[in-house]
Image (cartoon, rainbow, N blue to C red):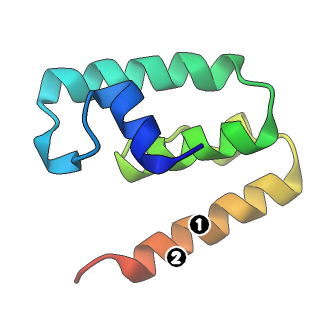
């Protein structure tokens, strides 16, 4: 899944700063539904990652039954925390 494609699909734009609050809420809701229905591990990880970036990611234990997936998600969170401006 391409990041820009996900952004356009759920928020109507690839520019995070251009997302209006109602569009953000609606996109997050749709991502949550899609995450709950998605069976492919890679696609689930991509959806969860985008939800993490917009501050709406569910708990790892709820989303990822596989320990490797939870570890990858923790690594992603660590990388994003290190990349965040201070």
> Could you say which is closer to the camera, residue 62 or residue 35?
35
Q: Vertically, is 58 above or below 26?
A: below
Q: Position of residue 62 (x, y in %)?
A: 70, 35
In the visual, does 64 lie left or right of 19?
A: right
Local secondary structure at mark 2: helix
| Residue plotted at (86% across, 59% down) | 68
Q: Position of residue 81 (x, y in %)?
A: 42, 74
- Left or right: residue 20 versus residue 40 is left
- Mark 1 is surrounded, within 10 Å at the Cα level, by few (under 14), some (14 to 19) or many (20 or more) other residues, namely some
Q: Residue at x 45, y 37 (%)?
A: 6
Residue 60 in picture, x, y percent from top left: 66, 46
Element assignment for label 1? helix
Distance from disc 1 to disc 2, alpha carbons, whole Å, reads 5 Å
CB-based contact (under 8 Å), mark 1 and mark 2 = yes
31 or 55: which is nearer to us? 31
Vertical order, 9 against 53 (above or below): above
- In the picture shown, does residue 11 fall above or below 59? above
Q: Residue at x 37, y 38 (%)?
A: 7
Residue ID for mark 2: 79
Q: Position of residue 52 (x, y in %)?
A: 46, 49
Tell how many labels: 2
Reading the image, the residue beneath label 1 is: 76
């Amino acid at each position: 899944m391409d990041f820009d494609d996900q952004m356009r699909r759920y928020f109507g734009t690839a520019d995070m700063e251009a997302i209006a609050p109602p569009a953000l809420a609606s996109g997050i809701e749709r991502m949550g539904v899609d995450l709950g229905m998605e069976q492919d591990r890679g696609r689930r990880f991509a959806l969860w990652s985008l939800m993490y970036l917009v501050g709406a990611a569910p708990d790892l234990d709820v989303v990822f039954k596989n320990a490797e997936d939870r570890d990858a998600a923790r690594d992603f969170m660590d990388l994003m925390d290190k990349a965040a401006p201070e």
